[in-house]
Amino acid sequence: MTAEEALKWVEQRFGATAAIASSFGLEDVVLLELASKHAPSVKVFTLDTGRLPAETYELIDRLRERYGVKFETFFPNTHAVEELVTGKGHFSFRQSVELRKECCGIRKVEPLSRALAGRAAWVTGLRREQAATRAAVEVTEQDAAHGGIWKINPLAEWTQRQCWDFVKEHHLPVNALHQQGYPSIGCGPCTRAVKPGEDVRAGRWWWESPDHKECGLHLPAPDGGTK
C-alpha cells in the first residue's frame, strides 16, 4: 500500500481506536499532514521523556495550532525517574547499553505501554532507510511486543529525500534542529548533529554501535520475525 492507502485503511478499520505515535521529527510531520486528509479520526500521542530539546516543544505548539489537534502526552512515572537519577545520576545511560536501555525503559517504553492501552492499532513514522535495525519494517504488522495489536508504518518505503520533498511541497513546519545537522532527534543528552557522510541515526546514542540503536519502542517479535 501507498502511505495514503495505508492511512485510509487505518481510518476505515480502526478510526479513533488507532493512534499515531509522534516524536515530531521529519517523518512525523509528514504523517500528520497525510493523516489530516486520510485518517482524521485517528488520535495522536507523544511521549515526553522530560529531556526533549526546546526546539521540539516549539514545533509541537506550532503543529497544535496548524491542525487544531490536542496531542495526548504521556510522561514517565515520577517515582521511577526519581529513583533512577538519585541512585545512578543524570547520565548513567552513557555507562553501558544496559543502563541506557534502563533509562529508555523508564522514560519511553513504560509510558508507551500506557499510551497503547486499549488501542486497536498504532501508526509510526518508521522507514527502512533509517537504520540497519529497521531494514525489515513492513507497512502493516501485528505487534507481538504489544499484545498483537496492529502496527502500521505508512512511510516504510519512503526515502529521506521523499520526506523532505513532501515537506517543501506542502510548506510544513519542521524541527529547527533538522537545519542544524540533526536528521534524527530524540532526547537532548542522547542526540547530536551528524557529520558529513554519516548515517542519519549516527547522532542517536553516538557512543554505541549501530546494530542495537533502538530505545525499545520498536522491538521485533520475540522469535526475531515479523508477526
Image: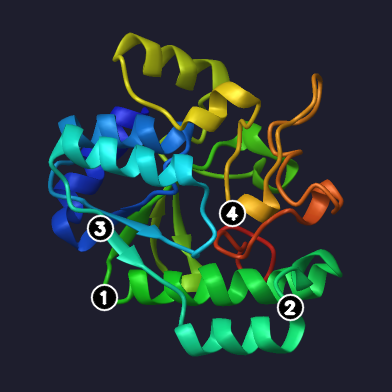
Precedes in sequence: disc 3 or disc 1: 3
Q: CA distance from mark 2 to mark 4?
A: 16 Å
Q: Which mark is residue 187?
A: 4
Provide the residue designation for mark 3.
Answer: 18
**Is 216 above or below relative to 169?**
below
Precedes in sequence: disc 4 or disc 3: 3
Residue at (56% x, 22% y) in the render: 179
Query: Which label lies toward us, 4 or 1?
Result: 4
Q: CA distance from mark 2 to mark 1?
A: 34 Å
Q: Nearer the viewer, residue 104 or 120?
A: 104
Query: Which label lies toward us, 4 or 3?
Result: 4
Q: CA distance from mark 3 to mark 1?
A: 9 Å
- What colour scheme has been applied to the protein in the rendered image? rainbow
* Mark 4 crowd level (few <14, some 14–19, many ≥20, 10 Å Cα): some
Query: Which label lies toward us, 2 or 1?
Result: 2
Callout 3 amino acid: Ala
Q: State the SS at label 1.
A: loop
Q: State the SS at label 3.
A: strand
Callout 1 amino acid: Gly
* Mark 3 crowd level (few <14, some 14–19, many ≥20, 10 Å Cα): many
Q: CA distance from mark 4 to mark 1?
A: 27 Å
Provide the residue designation for mark 2.
Answer: 89
Q: Are marks 4 and 1 in contact (CB under 8 Å)?
A: no
Q: Would residue 7 be found to the left or right of residue 139 on screen?
A: left
